């Protein structure tokens, strides 16, 4: 990891940062790099209400808001932006709206690196809308001014088309911190945390997947 002027992380839901990015974010913070996390929705239409359930459809909004605020505190963020869009509707925003929101943040913050999802490889419609907005915003910038795109792709049937991730960030020494960040999202992460704490082959595989390295793909606009 090189020291950046500013890293901008853009995801649609609370907890999107926790699984595959929070170790990387924590490392940047500890390097003295300013990190901004822009979370577009509160994830309050999600199906998970805790394990066992402790939230209701009415209370989930405030619960997930508190969870992402605690996650940001554990990462060490000074700039958490909760943009408040309606969950599961980002694809229906007016054409160009989200792109404009992203471009405004780029113009304000001047990030040298942006972390978000990879368009076409992120499964959820909100993930895809976010990814597309970021790529469109960056693609309209002069090539010499574009931040580096560091993108998260989900494992699905088409992921093999991308090949192996070309950005691998070791999170050695950050395992305990990352687990606390994931645990902050209590309404969403219970089963995974239980698996990580186990003594089975599945648990070992989960620890290797989530607690050793965080992997990304670079994205060339040209």
Image (cartoon, rainbow, N blue to C red):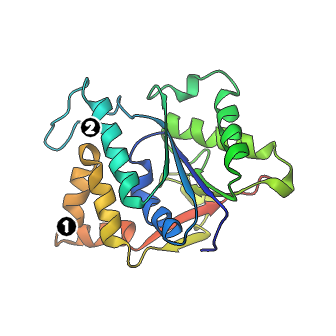
Residue 136: % across, % down: 73, 40
Is 110 situated left or right of 93 in this image? right
Q: Is residue 216 above or below residue 191?
A: below
Where, by quadrant of the figure, is residue 98 drawn?
top right
- x and y, in percent, of residue 128 in the image: 57, 39
- Residue placed under numbered mark 1 in the picture: 197
Say which residue appears at 55% left-offset and 57% top-offset. Answer: 35
Q: Quadrant of the N terminus?
A: bottom right
Q: Residue at x 20, y 41 (%)?
A: 50
In the figure, residue 139 lies in which quadrant? top right
Q: Is residue 173 left or right of 131 when viewed as pictured? A: left
> Above or below — where is 210 with respect to 79?
below
Q: Residue furthest bottom?
A: 172
Question: Which numbered dot is residue 210?
Answer: none
Query: What residue is drawn where x is 38% and y is 48%?
Result: 15
**Residue 48 got which mark?**
2
State the quadrant of the C terminus.
bottom right
Are there few (<14), some (14-19), or many (20+) residues within 10 Å of tag 2? some
Examine the rendering and report whether any part of residue 104 can be seen: yes
Q: CA distance from mark 2 to mark 1?
A: 20 Å
Asked whether the beta carbons under mark 2 and mark 1 sit within 8 Å of each other, the answer is no
Q: Earlier in the sequence, mark 2 or mark 1?
A: 2
Does dot 2 land on a helix, a strand or a loop? loop
| Residue 21 as seen in the image, left or right of residue 138 | left
Residue 74 percent location from the top left of the image:
36, 59
């Amino acid at each position: 990891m090189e020291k950046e002027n500013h890293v901008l992380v853009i995801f649609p839901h609370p907890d999107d940062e926790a699984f595959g990015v929070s170790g990387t974010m924590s490392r940047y913070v500890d390097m003295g790099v300013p990190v901004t996390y822009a979370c577009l929705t509160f994830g309050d239409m999600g199906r998970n209400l805790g394990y066992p359930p402790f939230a209701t459809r009415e209370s989930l909004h405030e619960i997930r808001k508190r969870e992402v605020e605690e996650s940001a505190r554990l990462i060490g963020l000074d700039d958490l932006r909760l943009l408040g869009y309606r969950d599961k509707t980002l694809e229906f925003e007016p054409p160009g709206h989200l792109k404009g929101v992203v471009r405004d943040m780029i113009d304000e913050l001047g990030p040298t690196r942006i972390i978000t999802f990879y368009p076409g490889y992120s499964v959820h419609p909100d993930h895809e809308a976010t990814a597309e907005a970021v790529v469109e915003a960056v693609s309209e910038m002069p090539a010499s001014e574009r931040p580096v795109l560091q993108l998260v792709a989900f494992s699905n049937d088409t992921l093999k088309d991308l090949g192996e991730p070309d950005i691998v960030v070791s999170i050695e020494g950050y395992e305990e911190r990352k687990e606390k960040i994931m645990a902050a999202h209590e309404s969403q992460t219970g089963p995974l945390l239980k698996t990580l704490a186990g003594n089975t082959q599945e648990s070992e595989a989960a620890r290797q997947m989530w607690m050793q390295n965080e992997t990304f793909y670079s994205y060339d606009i040209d």
